[in-house]
Amino acid sequence: GVSAIISTHTPFWWAEGGAEYWSDKAGYNNWGTSREAYLRTSFLEDRVLDQSEWTTRIDKEGFDGERGYNQGYAFGLFLYEHLGQDMMSQMAFKSAERWHWSWDSVVKEATGQEMDTLYDAWIDYQTKHYEKQLEPIRAKGLVQGKELSLVELPWESDDPAQTELWAKTSKKDRDIWQ
């Protein structure tokens, strides 16, 4: 005989970010300073996962796997704060009611808004939040130096060819190298 499992693919951001979010709501997890620093760094260094990268865990390398957990968790907290309800749980309830061809339709039924709209609102909110934190630091002037290392790091090289090569390297490949 033949058997097949047919299910809506629950996206990485919802499954893993949701696990972090629900353990927070249960009192076993919390959004702390290290999570905040990691999210802030992702935003300020332009390494926030886009919606297509949020979908699956399988293709993640470097720090992108952790970004999926962290950003999904932050997105759940954002939805709770801005929509006034536990939207992550509402998505679970909507998903359980009937078959859905896409997770975006689950999000729409649960929140009344398109996934693109919610994602863009989250990006905008977080970007403004972190830029505001950076303003007083920039006003005082950034102090930059070199990392302590036993080898010359490619992003700090005095060799123009090396720094040019590093500048052309994608942010994703930089994460893998580091």
Image: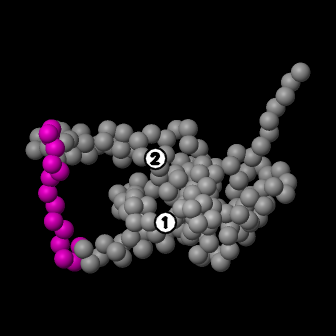
Residue, disc 1: 31
Q: Earlier in the sequence, mark 2 or mark 1?
A: 1
**Which range of residues does the magenta coloring cover?**
138-152
Q: Residue furthest left?
A: 158
> Hey, which residue is sitting farthest front in the picture?
28
Q: Give the residue drawn at x 52%, y 51%.
A: 68
The residue shown at (42%, 74%) is 129
The residue to which callout 2 is attached is 64
Q: Nearer the viewer, mark 2 or mark 1?
A: 1
Q: Position of residue 150 (x, y in %)?
A: 14, 39
> On residue 62, which mark appears?
none
Return the x and y of residue 126 as percentages of the image width and height: 46, 69
Amino acid residing under circle 1: Trp
Identify the main secondary structure in magenta.
loop
Query: Which part of the image, by quadrant, shows the C terminus?
Result: top left
Rendering coords of residue 84 (x, y %): 65, 78
- Name the secondary structure under disc 2: helix
